[in-house]
């Protein structure tokens, strides 16, 4: 009975894991930062997302929208057939991060 319960628990844990995991390797940013008089960073999420979108488009990626997702940049990229695909990029170099 205990062995069956452990097997069911293991299968349940495996089934509830994310469908894929992406690992981004370079987390450095090429964006210059400004600080206010109190040393607080003057950048918000929307500015960072706009910067990431611009950097991806300059590299030929037809990104529609982007956001930071863990240590990666998650981009919704328009494919040639008009559909969108979620892709992940390294935030420092904006190279494609592949599923691990």
Image: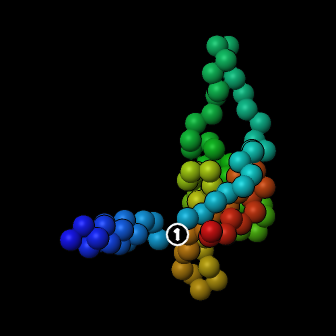
Task: Find residue 88 and report its image quarter.
Answer: bottom right
Judge by depth and name the residue closer to the eye, 2 or 38: 2
The percent position of residue 80, horizontal first and vertical second, equals 64, 83
Point out residue 44 in the picture as x, y percentages from the top left corner: 58, 36
Residue 55: x and y in percent read 74, 55
| Element under disc 1 | loop
Name the residue nearer the viewer: 6 or 23: 6
What residue is at 36 percent from the left and 68 percent from the top? 10
The answer to whether residue 12 is left or right of residue 17 is: left
> Left of 33 or right of it: where is 69?
left
Q: Residue at x 55, y 53 (%)?
A: 69
Answer with left or right where residue 81 lies relative to residue 18: right
Q: Quadrant of residue 75?
A: bottom right
Lateral position of residue 56 relative to residue 45, left or right: right
Q: Is residue 12 visible?
A: no
Tell me the residue at 40%/69% (across/down): 14
Q: Quadrant of the C terminus?
A: bottom right
Residue under the point 63% across and 21% down:
40
Q: Could you say which is closer to the camera, residue 6 or residue 29? A: 6
- Which residue has dot 1 on it? 20
Position of residue 80 relative to residue 52, above or below, is: below
């Amino acid at each position: 009975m205990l062995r069956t319960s452990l097997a069911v628990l293991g299968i349940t844990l495996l089934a509830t894991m994310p469908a894929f995991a992406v690992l981004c390797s370079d987390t450095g940013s090429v964006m210059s930062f400004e600080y206010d008089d109190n040393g607080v960073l003057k950048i918000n999420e929307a500015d960072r997302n706009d910067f990431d979108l611009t950097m991806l488009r300059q590299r030929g990626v037809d990104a529609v929208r982007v956001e930071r997702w863990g240590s990666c940049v998650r981009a919704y990229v328009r494919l040639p057939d008009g559909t969108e695909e979620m892709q992940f990029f390294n935030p420092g170099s904006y190279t494609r991060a592949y599923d691990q």
